[in-house]
Image (cartoon, helix red, strand yellow):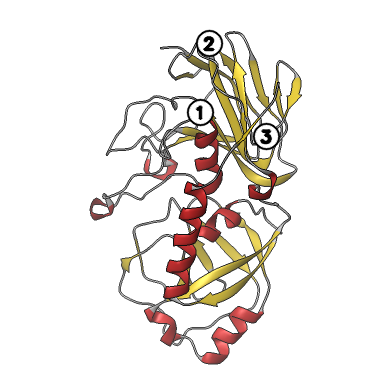
């Protein structure tokens, strides 16, 4: 089995599969890709299963040398991509051969890109996943939760075949324009917030602060004050919107803690976390309330759309 050598790891590049599920009982979080749709489309371009391991590249700067024949695809943020110093497009498949150098520049829009390879990157799983969670020192290439480092070797299957070159249709590529409307399902703790407080939340614009990472995004905007100062610690779902004492919401993400004691207004629809993941500090967002039935319908329609997505064949 050949692979890729890491020449330059970039700002924060992590090996991720779909995530680590079923281990909240011992305090392990899920991990996995922040932008799940871009991750899945990168794998789809390479003919992989949805949960095949890819590299999540934050902002950019990753440089790899190919050690075998394979096919790659990069999706997500608008990150310049070159192969042997020649600019090539995102959102499509590219063949690489031994000695090829793959370079990712730095994002002009969005914040996270996904580099997939045919057959997926190979590493030893721990707790059923190789998803990298730095705060838990778990997963990744060396099972220690560390980002990729220079001279790391990323194993992947050798592929002498030349499969079709594919491209994601333009209408399925997100526009990372620095703003987003995020749908929210109100939770059972919504009664800790008055109707005025909820109206304020849903009518206000919030900005993403510098306190944002894979664990959660802290927002700045209208202050929301719950009627209770805290609760007994309980399990936290992906996308939960916590409101601490300062009244500034925090959206909990892939590397969130598994329990917490701040009141929660509700949870972000999982589909909209992809858009949220591409925002950078200073970008703005608004919230829209939806019902649980509307959320289920949105998820069902999105899965049907993804399953029926026809990638375009690239003529060469």
Rendered residue at 57%/91% (across/down): 196
Q: Is residue 93 left or right of residue 267?
A: right
Rendered residue at 69%/45% (across/down): 170
Q: How many callouts does the rendering have?
A: 3
- Residue 316: which disc? none
Rendered residue at 51%/72% (across/down): 184
Q: Secondary structure at mark 3?
A: loop
Quickly name the residue at label 2.
67
- Residue 148: which disc? 1
From the viewer's perspective, is residue 241 above or below residue 42?
A: below
Pick out the residue farthest to the left: 25
Quickly name the residue at label 3.
90
Q: Secondary structure at mark 1?
A: loop
Please state which of residues 118 and 311 is positioned toward the viewer in this rendering. Answer: 311
- In which image quadrant can residue 25 be found? bottom left
Which of labels 3 and 1 is toward the front?
A: 3
From the viewer's perspective, is residue 124 above or below residue 200?
A: above
Please state which of residues 112 and 120 is positioned toward the viewer in this rendering. Answer: 120
Label 3 and label 1: CA atoms lie apart by 22 Å
Where is residue 267 shown, x and y percent of the image? 46, 69
Answer few, some or many: residues within 10 Å of disc 1's Cα (few below 14, many 20 plus, some between 14 and 19): many
Where is residue 123 shown, x and y percent of the image? 37, 25
Which of labels 2 and 1 is toward the front?
A: 2
Q: Earlier in the sequence, mark 3 or mark 1?
A: 3
- In which image quadrant can residue 120 be found? top left
Pick out the residue farthest to the bottom: 195
């Amino acid at each position: 089995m050949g692979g890729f050598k890491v020449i330059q790891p970039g700002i924060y590049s992590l090996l991720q599969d779909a995530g680590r599920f079923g281990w909240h009982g011992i305090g392990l979080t899920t991990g996995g890709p922040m932008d799940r749709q871009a991750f899945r489309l990168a794998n789809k371009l390479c003919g992989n299963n949805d949960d095949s391991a890819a590299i999540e590249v934050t902002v950019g700067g990753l440089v790899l040398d190919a050690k075998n024949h394979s096919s790659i695809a990069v999706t997500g943020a608008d990150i310049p991509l070159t192969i042997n110093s020649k600019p090539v497009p995102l959102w499509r498949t590219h063949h690489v051969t031994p000695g090829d150098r793959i370079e990712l520049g730095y994002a002009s829009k969005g914040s996270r890109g996904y580099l997939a390879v045919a057959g997926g990157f190979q590493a030893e799983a721990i707790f059923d996943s190789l998803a990298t969670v730095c705060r838990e020192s778990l997963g990744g290439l060396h099972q220690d939760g560390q980002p990729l480092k220079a001279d790391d070797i990323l194993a992947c299957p050798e592929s002498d075949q030349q499969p079709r070159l594919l491209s994601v249709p333009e209408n399925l590529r997100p526009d990372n324009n620095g703003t987003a409307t995020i749908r929210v399902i109100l939770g059972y703790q919504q009664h800790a917030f008055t109707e005025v407080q909820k109206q304020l939340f849903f009518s206000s614009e919030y900005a993403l602060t510098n306190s944002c990472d894979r664990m959660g995004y802290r927002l700045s905007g209208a202050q929301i004050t719950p009627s209770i100062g805290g609760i007994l610690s309980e399990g936290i779902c992906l996308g939960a919107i916590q409101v601490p004492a300062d009244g500034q919401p925090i959206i909990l993400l892939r590397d969130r803690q598994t329990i917490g004691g701040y009141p929660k207004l509700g949870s972000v629809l999982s589909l909209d976390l992809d858009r949220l993941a591409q925002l950078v500090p200073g970008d703005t967002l608004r919230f829209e309330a939806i019902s649980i039935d509307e959320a289920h319908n949105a998820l069902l329609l999105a899965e049907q759309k993804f399953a029926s997505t026809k990638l375009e064949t690239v003529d060469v």
